[in-house]
Image (cartoon, grey):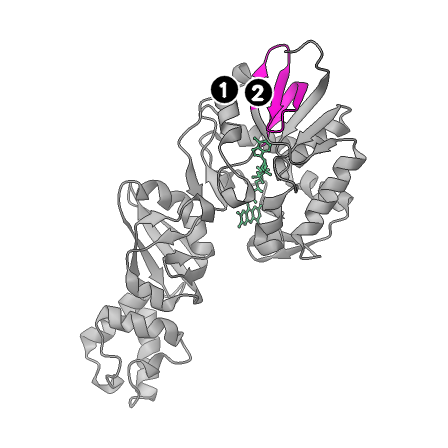
Amino acid sequence: MGAALKLRDTTVVGGGAAGMMAAIVAAESGEQVALLEGNEQLGRKILISGNGRCNLTNLAADEQKHYHGNHPHFSRAILQQFRLRDTLEFFADLGIELREEKRRRLFPVSDQAQSVVDLLVDKMRCSGVQIETGAKVIDGHFDAGFELRLADGRTFGSERLVLASGGVSLARLGADRSGMDLAIGWGHEITALRPGLVPLISPEKYLAKMQGLKIRAEVSVEIPGGRRIADTDDLLFTKYGVSGFTILNLSLRVVPELAKGPIVLRVNLFPGRSPEQVGRMLEERWLRHPHRSLELSFAGLLSSKLVRPLLDRLGYDRALCVARLGRDMRGQLSRALTGWVIEVSEPRPFDYAEVTVGGDKHGWDKSRHS
Ligand SMILES: Cc1cc2nc3c(=O)[nH]c(=O)nc-3n(C[C@H](O)[C@H](O)[C@H](O)COP(=O)(O)OP(=O)(O)OC[C@H]3O[C@@H](n4cnc5c(N)ncnc54)[C@H](O)[C@@H]3O)c2cc1C
């Protein structure tokens, strides 16, 4: 540590959601704080979160079951110190009014993620945080304190360091491994990183014909050990495979399995209904309009953008008059529509992942972090 370097109390590396919160909390407790952000703009990931509206918390955020890391004690200890109630009070104090949407998600009434960033920055300024943008940390040493070297040659010294450099997803927003490398340099071990909340690629080319179609469906998957996990919500078809809430949510469990080989997803196009119930519903339609072709018999029930490629894929003659559908074909069809098999082979890369899964191998260990 150079003798001339003046040590402030705390430096925060990273001006995303985590770094800005950490800087505010440290400054509010009386510390002298500098926040170093590599981008010219703070909170770039917040700006694209929730489709630009920022789903900033969830009314179920206190439920431990929603935390999926390898070290549940880590999240438990942290979350007990700052509970949902504290989060709501914090944002209310900033002046952000919230509205609840499906799955208990909370969004700013302004519908603008920008308002969240603006008010976090305002809070940092009012709390006396020294904000440095365009301040990419490229190297760091620890001696009597932390000394950080920036890409532009400047140095910053502090007694404490908060490394809030985020994950590696979305390199176009400035994300990279530099923060992880700093942590490794200080003796942390990092687990393998995986894309999380990520769309899945399918080798089944016919899905591309459904590109852009979003439906509500139940998607399930059997994971090793025979356990079935499922999610009912939006399913989006893309030119590479599948996305939407269901897929992003299931990706957490599916992506590690994809490292071992392809996985089969089962899609129920009629969530909550059994093959028998769907079979009876279709029978009624076919009885009422026996002159219709198989394809037309789904009009008003399922999108034609889905029905055409799916019937082709399942090997049905779309033009077949429903009166001529055999008993076996009827049964097969209702089973296929409630258990449509879609194979997926890999996740989309980090550039399409909302989060990075993995990180510090040991989680929070008092003896290593004190
Ligand atoms: C498309 C999309 C939608 C999302 N939607 C939601 C949502 O609705 N709700 C939700 O809760 N979450 C959402 N997320 C996830 C959420 O955006 C992230 O979990 C959150 O922003 C992570 O915050 P962070 O501060 O940990 O990391 P980041 O936001 O990645 O911030 C880290 C910061 O550190 C900076 N940095 C990195 N290395 C250095 C360095 N060496 N020197 C200086 N600065 C450095 C980076 O430039 C970056 O600004 C979404 C993510 C994406 C991609």
Q: Is residue 59 above or below residue 311?
A: above
Q: Position of residue 126 (x, y in %)?
A: 80, 36
Three-letter amino acid code at disc 2?
A: Gly
Residue name at image x 34 percent, y 83 percent: 296
Indicate whether residue 54 is drawn in magenta: no
Residue lying at the far right in this picture: please name it: 126
Indicate whether residue 162 is drawn in magenta: yes
201 relative position to 73: left or right: left
State yes or no: discs 2 and 1 in contact (Cβ < 8 Å): yes
Q: Is residue 334 above or below residue 70?
A: below
Q: Position of residue 100 (x, y in %)?
A: 64, 55
> Which corner quadrant of the figure contains ligand 1?
top right
Q: Which residues are magenta?
A: 139-164
Three-letter amino acid code at disc 1?
A: Gly
For the C terminus, the image quarter is top right
> Considering the numbered disc 2 on the image, is that residue within a helix, a strand or a loop?
strand
Mark 2 to mark 1: distance in Å? Answer: 8 Å
Q: Which mark is residue 140?
A: 2
2 relative position to 309: left or right: right
Q: Where does label 1 land, which residue? A: 185
Label 1 packing within 10 angstroms: few (<14), some (14-19), many (20+): some
Residue name at image x 22 percent, y 75 percent: 316
> Considering the numbered disc 1 on the image, is that residue within a helix, a strand or a loop?
helix
Residues 170 and 261: in front is 170
Residue name at image x 28 percent, y 60 percent: 204
